[in-house]
Amino acid sequence: MLRTLFNASCFFAMRVTLILVILVSGIPSYAQQFNAGASFGVNASQVSGDGYAGFDKAGISAGLFSTTRIDDKFDFQFEINYSEKGSRKNAKPSEDDNDFFLLRMPYVEIPFMIRYHKNKFTYEAGLSYSRLLSYYLENENGPFELEPQINQFSDNDFAFLLGINFNFTDNLIMNWRFNTSFLPFRKYDSGSNELPFDAGMYHHYIGFVMKYQFLGSYGK
């Protein structure tokens, strides 16, 4: 399974890299307004609606990004990432708590952002679409799957995001990001929709990512 996910991520990365190279090689004047790079980091995630709280599930985030300058202050950024989301609750035997839960959900995630530059900081806001690759569920009794007669996980996740970037150099960037679903990726079996956030399960994660621009540079 891990090898399959890794191969899928590499395939997406190779395709995007090829597209970027073709665009920049074929349109030199456009390249002056076009930056591209790669990113790698971690997500700290949780799920509202699973009965557990806390950003306790760690996961990998890695991908490619491209940026198109709008003017001296604003740009538009597109990304394609491998992003692990989910939820985790560890047992605490010393406190007579044997309850364990793990939900691991790797996605291909595509964020679209408008960004504002000020000095070495860049502030971003946007939307993201994610496509589920697989899921893994485990509790204190071992791995399990959702019963076929109940609501299943959706293949799609839609989210808002906010973030801050800090440029250590022209090409090395640190990114902090908060991402939260605005549609449930799994509905409650009761079908209750009485409250906006009482209709199902929603992803939330905080991302910590290092980015390297291998094409173009900050502010150019």
Image: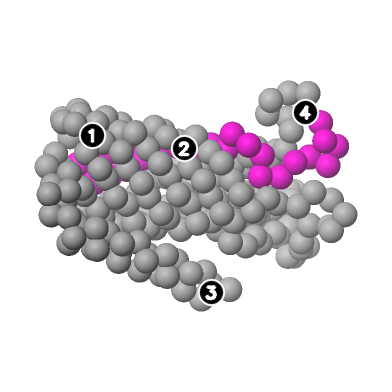
The residue sitting at 82% across, 36% down in the picture is 191
* N-term mark: 2 or 3: 3
Question: Secondary structure under badge 3?
Answer: helix
As drawn, the residue found furthest toward the bottom would be 3
**Labels 2 & 3 near each other (Cβ < 8 A):** no
Amino acid type, label 1: Ile
Identify residue type, mark 3.
Thr
Q: Which residue, given by chain and number where applicable, does mark 4 sit on?
A: 193
Q: Quadrant of the C terminus?
A: top left
Residue 4: which numbered mark, if any?
3
Q: Give the image location of residue 113, x and y in percent.
A: 37, 37
How far apart in space, not on screen, are marks 1 and 4 (Cα)? 40 Å
Magenta span contains residue 174:
yes
Estimate the spatial distance between the alpha carbons at disc 3 and disc 1, rounded to whole Å: 38 Å
Residue at 78% of width from left, 57% of height from top? 146
Q: Is residue 63 above or below residue 186?
A: below
Q: How dense is the environment of label 1, judged by Cα within 10 Å: few (below 14), some, or many (20 and up)?
A: few
* Amino acid carrying mark 2 in the image: Leu
Q: What label does residue 127 carry, if any?
A: 2
Secondary structure at badge 2 equals strand
For label 4, count other residues whose C-alpha is less than 10 Å away and answer few (under 14), some (14-19) or many (20+): few
Q: Which residue is mark 1?
A: 70
Left-right relation of 188 to 179: right
User: Does 123 sit above or below residue 172?
Assistant: above
Element under disc 4: loop
- Mark toward the start of the polypeptide (2 vs 4): 2
Place of residue 153 in the rendered image (x, y in percent of width and height, measured from the top left): 70, 51
- Start and end of the magenta stretch? 163-192
What type is the residue that disc 4 sits on?
Answer: Asn
